[in-house]
Image (cartoon, rainbow, N blue to C red):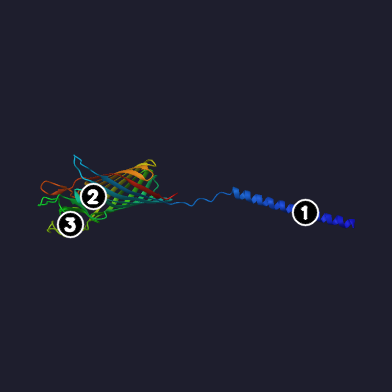
Amino acid sequence: MKKVLTLVAALVAATVSLSAQDTQKAAAEAAAALTAATDAPAPAPKPVYWTRSILNQINFGQTSLWNWAAGGYNNYTLAAAIDANANYKKDKMIWTNRLQLDYGFLYSADKPILQKTKDRIYFESKWGYDTPVRHLYYSANFDFKTQFNDNWKYGTPKNEAGSDPTIDQWLAARTLMSDFLSPAYINFGLGVLWTPKPWFSLNFSPLAVDFVVVQNTKLRNTYGMELRETGLDPKEGSNYKPFRFGLGAQLKADAKWVVNDNFSYTTQLVLFSNYLHKPLNLRVNWDNKVFWKLAKYFALTLSTNLIYDENVKVKALSDGTKVPAVQFKEFLEFGFTYTIASKN
């Protein structure tokens, strides 16, 4: 009996020993697996090829006078702007897109009508593919520019009764200056894009096709459209062609200096030379914008637009004829601003 008990005790001891060894082995294997998992490299982040941003602005101005000896009129201004960007970059290819929308109007007590102060639709797209030369890309460039609706120049109406002019008299005295697709500028060019700095780019298109469209027949003579046939009455707008074709070269320079998160300066200069008609007489467009964010949702914006186009007759001479001249517009605005941007 004593031998049997000794044998049973030995078997139990052997079983416990084997179980302990298995447990230690399993623990060691688990520890090794955990260490391997900790040392394994983290998965690479998913590449981001697109970056997007939308700047939204609403600006308001108001002037109120009460017994003001120097004179003047109560007035109110309201303007809205959107500046949207969508840019793509992958390997050797880049593609940048920008849409600018501006619209604003003024109400002044001296005229019982709304007068438009700003109106612009401007879309531009640039595509580039890397060349063996550093910072140089083969490029294709597309631009489209027009406005939302009609714009008028208001003269002073005559009222024989001596009282203030009525709304109908003000409307009768105005002159149409521009309209939707009147004019519209469409340009497509092939060339090279040079980006020596992140804040500067220069796009040169020695082969650029340019279309100027004037849909409204009343404005075709103002914007230099050609007569359909020689000998037609130049005073009749329908006698002019609705578009003008140009083949030439375009140079576009863009720069943006960001001083800090709250202050930036953006400028763009576009020059176009028409090979088919007076190539030395350049069409000039120069836009500037200073953006100063004063608080989280409020900013001060100074913008200017300069245009020279010898085909656009804007300056009236003493004999009543109109000739080309430099066009300049400036805005200083304060208001609400909010930016929506993608996260890299």
Left or right of 261, for residue 321: left
Left or right of 296, for residue 211: left
Q: Earlier in the sequence, mark 2 or mark 1?
A: 1
What residue does disc 2 label? Answer: 107
Q: CA distance from mark 1 to mark 3?
A: 105 Å
Q: Earlier in the sequence, mark 1 or mark 3?
A: 1
Residue count near mark 1 (Cα–Cα under 10 Å), binned few <14, some 14–19, many ≥20 = few
CB atoms at circles 3 and 2 under 8 Å apart? no
Amino acid type for the residue under numbered disc 2: Tyr
Q: CA distance from mark 2 to mark 1?
A: 97 Å
Judge whether residue 95 can be spotted in this image: no
Foreground residue, 311 or 29? 29
What residue does disc 3 label? Answer: 218
Q: Position of residue 250 (x, y in %)?
A: 28, 49
CB atoms at circles 1 and 3 under 8 Å apart? no
Q: Position of residue 344 (x, y in %)?
A: 45, 49
What residue does disc 1 label? Answer: 16
Residue count near mark 3 (Cα–Cα under 10 Å), binned few <14, some 14–19, many ≥20 = some
Foreground residue, 219 or 298? 298
Residue 333 has which mark? Answer: none
Foreground mark, 3 or 2? Answer: 2
